[in-house]
């Protein structure tokens, strides 16, 4: 073996301590690694044609569809890459059995080790002396354990395992039911061993579920720097002497990876660089070839890559699945449930990790021979084909809330996945308010603050107490027959089957009878036992009827996405009708994308939760928050072409560190529904009930700013023709105009702050200012850099910083430039009256003598304190509804607001009713939809440039070069964008101020009235005779479009390149906004024609 050295561990080791004694020197060429000698080497080929007689039939047996048993799903998800020319008749490559798998380096000290093990067992006297040799021989030769285990473990540990197994056998024999049940587990930080009694082809929900344990602790652990490989073997024979015995032993071995290069590039595919050292030593040449080919595909894909191989001379199949690490939590155990469902078992399984971020699972499958005789199963070839097809669906959500119903065979994978998705849907859209709420709403006076407060509290209570997620799930799981019928209806509409699809394996309709919507309604009424059950199961029908298109049946996908018709939303709760909505469900998250116009733009935010309680609140408010954000965006987008939209992704409680994976899946699955499929077998066409092309314009928001470049590049790689404009806020190298770098959002907010000072003749240097959202954020840092007031308090994610005498401006500027929190403020620069309370602080005594018991609670409510230290409050960060109808009373004392001026920089920081209460108490409030629109203006002009330039011109004039140098056009264009932001903000500020003085109407209401007036007039103008008049159309576009773009590209070229719908929006929004800003929200009917 040359330079290959395997050293057993020195001395005894405790079970709980590190036991990895395997040291393999790999600092030599790959050619020096041991390789299995292929007895068929003379053929020079490891792939061969299989005799025709071995080719199995590839059609589902008709009688199976009509009888009880495991029905395959109409799921065209088989991904097979025939990388070499010669393949079997079923599409699988054929591998000579002698060339595949793993060959462990021979442990020459095994005989000597067995003697040491015997001596230890003999000394312990737990096993009768005449049984010691048979037990040792059984352990060493009958369980299928390879030599690596014996090389790694020391004799004491092996003796302990043999003794434990013997004790388990004795305990099993003494059981009254005589059930053969042996279980052994040993877990250490760097490796683990599990041995369990296992009946081939069966999942035991009540068992120890070792696969769940090992994947939870080792494969899916939160520490991404530590990776583990897994080997699992089934003993060849059954356990015990009973002729009826079906149980065998399943052994799992987990080893911490020791990579050749732990920090390999994600695109690296050379095995000698990215592999674990043990894998390199054990894998045969053929296995390395297979892994190299599938990894080369996996690094360029977002979803799983799947291939099946036939084993020459054997009915066994080898299934290989590769995917990005950390993207499919629970996949290892879920795969076992999947092949068990189809009556298939595994003899060996391997999980290999590679340092480029790819995980490869290799499973050797064969028919289980101990299946229940009264159940019908497809043939092995049919089962394997169906398994490979369904892995794509399993990858999306490996562990659904109904997974137990799948693992026990009560429902199919498709039915449980579908039901899981509807379970998510029901949580957000079950009408929980009811007709009584509508009647109460009509009876109360919403202008009366007390009435409004009662209604607000009742709405929150009704939404939280009646239908909890667990209660909804309990109802769903009690009606498997209804789930099956409802899924059949769903699949009948959205499963596309035609000549170009896999008709040999897929029935055109599901196995269940497809019922009409009316018959489904009747069936639900008959099957349920109470009103609540009827409401939940009826929501399945609502879901089915709302889905316009879905990627559920697309062969390759990373998440499940649904384009929904929003007309099912109750008008009483959502008075403004949405134009479009997407629901996306991943294994890490759930999310929505909502828009109010066909041409719309808005950011994508990721919501994280610090605790389960916080998650429950966030989940409960998810859709309403998304709707509110999109609605605010719609109002603030009043003077740009795009309407309002927003996307919100909520991470699941145990997935808080996987925001990137959730974002990538969210984007890719939405692209599935926006792009036309052009790669059969990978991206097949979806059933499109909407029937029109859609384009979304997205942007960064909370927790997504660093992910925008990936989304842009991904849209480009998937062939999206509009990739340049798909995302705004991307890096300058991709033509983006970063809002934070140029202070785009803050420029608009500052115009409102300066406007108040200007109107009231205030000296900014004397104004005491409070700000939420600190120097670490976009809006907060730029507000500090551009401001000239006297800061008295700042609240951010780390805590609260206060100084009644004024915080040191130079120190704040330092923090803002570094983008760090107030936790890094130089405390020596505080006056004697100043203080800082961090979230983790407890029992802090303030200079006033007040004791703060909990720093987090103090931070969360500081903005509601009557400190007397605030004249101007500018929220630049914080959760939505931080000030609501209930909490706002803390800011009103003796009928007068304790804060005179508020400019709402952060979206939805105050509820509308809270703003009205404050204004009634004398506070001047400018709401988010007016103040926070600088970013959307910048993004809109970025989109326009992306659409106007061709690809070459875009790269030349809008993209920074490799050294970070900006083109001259880009620099000039940014200045024009900043000028436009300030102009739009001043126009709206003056319009609201003027109309308030004339009518005394609340500024918050006027902001909405202006938005409504502009958007209404905008729609009318887009479809008026004015747009049809070419002379007027060109004249308006010449005024509306930036002069720089017209000078560089030409008006005619811009009109030719920019989509007609977008030009219409420019035309309408420009005319409407300029008119309303000049003549107000309620002009005379002749005013427009007086222009």
Image (spheres, rainbow, N blue to C red):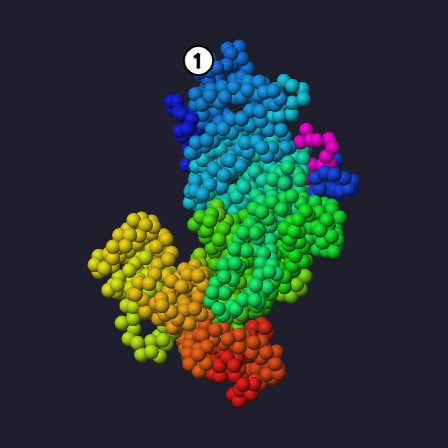
- Judge from the rendering whether residue 808 lies leftward or rightward of residue 930; answer left or right: left
Q: Quadrant of residue 505?
A: top right
Q: Is residue 111 visible?
A: yes
Q: Nearer the viewer, residue 320 or 527?
A: 527
Q: Position of residue 14 (x, y in %)?
A: 40, 25
- Judge from the rendering whether residue 542 lies leftward or rightward of residue 798; answer left or right: right
Q: How many marks?
A: 1
* Residue at disc 1, secondary structure: helix
Q: Nearer the viewer, residue 964 or 938?
A: 938
Q: Which residue is mark 1?
A: 123
Q: Position of residue 64 (x, y in %)?
A: 76, 40
- Judge from the rendering whether residue 563 lies leftward or rightward of residue 890; answer left or right: right
Is-magenta flag for residue 377? yes
The main secondary structure of the magenta stretch is loop
Q: Position of residue 544 (x, y in %)?
A: 67, 55
Q: Residue at x 42, y 75 (%)?
A: 985
Q: Residue at x 33, y 76 (%)?
A: 757
Mark 1 crowd level (few <14, some 14–19, many ≥20, 10 Å Cα): few
Q: Position of residue 60 (x, y in %)?
A: 74, 42
Judge whether 14 appears above or below 112 on screen.
Answer: below
Q: Is residue 705 visible?
A: no
Farthest-out residue, top: 130
Is-magenta flag for residue 1053? no
Judge whether 255 appears above or below 567 on screen.
Answer: above
Magenta stretch? 368-384
Farthest-out residue, bottom: 1090
Q: Residue at x 46, y 77 (%)?
A: 1001
Q: Residue at x 45, y 25 (%)?
A: 153
């Amino acid at each position: 073996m040359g330079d290959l050295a395997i050293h057993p561990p020195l001395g005894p080791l405790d079970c709980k301590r590190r036991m990895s004694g395997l040291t393999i020197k790999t600092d030599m060429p790959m050619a020096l690694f041991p390789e299995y000698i292929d007895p068929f080497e003379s053929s020079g080929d490891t792939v061969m044609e299989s005799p025709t007689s071995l080719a199995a039939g590839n059609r589902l047996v008709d009688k199976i569809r009509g009888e009880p048993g495991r029905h395959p799903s109409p799921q065209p998800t088989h991904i097979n890459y025939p990388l070499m020319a010669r393949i079997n008749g079923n599409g699988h490559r054929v591998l000579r059995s002698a060339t595949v798998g793993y060959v462990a380096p021979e442990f020459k000290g095994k005989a000597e080790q067995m003697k040491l093990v015997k001596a230890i067992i003999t000394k312990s006297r737990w096993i009768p002396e005449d049984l010691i040799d048979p037990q040792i021989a059984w352990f060493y030769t009958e369980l299928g354990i390879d030599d690596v285990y014996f090389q790694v473990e020391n004799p004491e540990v092996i003796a302990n395992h043999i003794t434990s197994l013997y004790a388990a056998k004795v305990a099993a024999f003494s059981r009254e039911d005589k059930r053969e049940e042996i279980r052994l587990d040993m877990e250490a930080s760097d490796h683990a061993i599990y041995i369990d009694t296992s009946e081939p082809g069966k999942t035991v929900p009540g068992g120890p579920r070792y696969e769940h344990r090992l994947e939870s602790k080792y494969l899916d652990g939160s520490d991404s720097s530590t990776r583990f490989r897994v080997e699992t073997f089934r003993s060849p024979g059954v356990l015990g002497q009973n002729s009826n015995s079906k149980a065998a032993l399943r052994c799992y071995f987990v080893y911490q990876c020791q990579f050749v290069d732990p920090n390999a590039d994600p695109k690296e595919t050379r095995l000698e660089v990215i592999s674990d050292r043990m894998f390199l030593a054990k894998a045969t040449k053929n296995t390395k070839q297979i892994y190299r080919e599938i990894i080369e595909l996996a690094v360029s894909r977002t979803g799983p890559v799947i291939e099946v191989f036939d084993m020459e001379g054997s009915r066994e199949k080898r299934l290989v699945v590769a995917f990005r690490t950390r993207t499919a939590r629970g996949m290892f155990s879920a795969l076992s449930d999947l092949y068990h469902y189809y009556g298939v078992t595994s003899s060996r399984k391997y999980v290999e990790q590679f340092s480029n971020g790819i995980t490869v699972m290799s499973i050797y499958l064969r028919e289980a021979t101990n299946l229940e005789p009264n159940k019908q199963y497809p043939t092995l070839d049919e089962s394997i084909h169906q398994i490979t097809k369904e892995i794509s669906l399993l990858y999306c959500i490996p562990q659904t809330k109904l997974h137990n119903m799948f693992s026990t065979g009560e429902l199919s994978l498709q039915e449980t996945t579908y039901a899981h998705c509807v379970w998510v849907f029901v949580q957000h859209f079950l009408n929980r308010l009811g007709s009584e709420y509508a009647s109460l709403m009509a009876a109360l006076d919403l202008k009366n603050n007390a009435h409004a407060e009662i209604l607000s509290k009742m709405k929150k209570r009704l939404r939280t107490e009646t239908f909890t997620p667990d209660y909804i799930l309990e109802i769903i799981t009690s009606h498997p027959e209804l789930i099956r019928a409802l899924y059949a209806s769903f699949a009948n509409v959205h499963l596309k089957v035609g000549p170009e699809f896999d008709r040999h394996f897929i029935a055109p309709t599901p196995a269940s009878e497809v019922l009409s919507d009316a018959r489904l309604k009747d069936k639900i009424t008959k099957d349920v036992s109470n009103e609540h059950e009827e409401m939940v199961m009826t929501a399945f029908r609502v879901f089915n009827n709302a889905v316009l298109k879905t990627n559920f049946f697309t062969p390759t996908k990373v998440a499940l996405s649904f384009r929904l018709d929003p007309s099912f939303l109750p008008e009483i709760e959502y008075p403004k009708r949405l134009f479009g909505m997407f629901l996306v469900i991943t294994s890490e998250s759930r999310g929505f994308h909502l828009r109010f116009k066909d041409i719309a733009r808005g950011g994508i935010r990721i919501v994280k939760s610090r605790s389960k309680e916080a998650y429950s609140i966030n989940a409960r408010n998810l859709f309403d928050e998304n709707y509110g954000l999109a609605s605010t965006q719609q109002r603030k987008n009043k003077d740009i072409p795009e309407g309002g939209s927003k996307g919100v992704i909520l991470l699941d409680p145990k997935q808080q560190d996987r925001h990137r994976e959730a974002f990538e899946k969210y984007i890719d699955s939405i692209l599935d529904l926006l792009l036309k499929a052009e790669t059969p077998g990978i991206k097949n066409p979806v059933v499109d009930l909407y029937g029109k092309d859609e384009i979304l314009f997205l942007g960064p928001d909370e927790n997504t700013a660093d992910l925008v470049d990936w989304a842009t590049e991904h849209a480009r790689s998937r062939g999206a023709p509009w990739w340049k404009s798909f995302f705004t806020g991307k890096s300058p190298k991709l033509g983006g105009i970063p809002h934070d770098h140029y202070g785009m959002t803050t420029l608009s907010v500052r115009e409102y702050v300066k406007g108040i000072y200007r109107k009231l003749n205030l000296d900014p240097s004397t104004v005491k200012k409070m700000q939420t959202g600190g120097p670490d954020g976009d809006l907060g840092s730029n507000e500090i850099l551009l401001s000239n007031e006297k800061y008295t308090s700042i609240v951010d994610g780390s805590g609260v910083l206060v100084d009644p005498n004024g915080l040191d401006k130079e120190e704040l500027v330092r923090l803002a430039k570094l983008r760090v929190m107030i936790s890094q403020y130089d405390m020596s620069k505080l006056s004697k009256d100043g203080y800082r309370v961090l979230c983790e602080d407890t029992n802090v005594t303030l200079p006033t003598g007040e004791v703060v018991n909990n720093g987090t609670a103090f931070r969360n409510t500081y903005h509601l304190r009557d400190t007397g230290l605030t004249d101007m409050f500018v929220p630049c960060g914080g959760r939505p509804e931080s000030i609501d109808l209930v909490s706002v009373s803390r800011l009103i004392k003796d009928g007068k607001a304790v804060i005179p001026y508020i400019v709402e920089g952060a979206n939805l920081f105050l509820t509308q009713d809270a703003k009205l209460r404050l204004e009634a108490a004398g506070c001047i409030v400018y709401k988010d939809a007016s103040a926070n629109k600088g970013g959307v203006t910048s993004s809109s002009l970025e989109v326009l440039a992306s659409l106007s330039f061709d690809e070459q011109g875009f790269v030349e004039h809008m993209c920074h070069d490799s050294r970070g140098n900006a083109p001259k056009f880009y620099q000039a264009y940014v200045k024009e964008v900043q000028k436009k932001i300030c102009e739009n903000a001043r126009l709206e500020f003056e319009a609201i101020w003027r109309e308030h003085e004339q009518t005394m109407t609340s500024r918050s209401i006027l902001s909405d009235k202006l938005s409504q007036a502009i958007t209404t007039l905008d729609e009318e103008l887009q479809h008026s005779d004015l747009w049809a008049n070419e002379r007027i159309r060109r004249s308006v576009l010449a005024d509306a479009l930036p002069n720089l773009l017209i000078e560089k590209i030409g008006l005619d070229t811009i009109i030719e390149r920019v989509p007609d719908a977008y030009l219409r929006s420019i035309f309408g929004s420009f005319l409407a906004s300029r008119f309303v800003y000049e003549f107000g929200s309620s002009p005379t009917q002749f005013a427009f024609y007086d222009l």
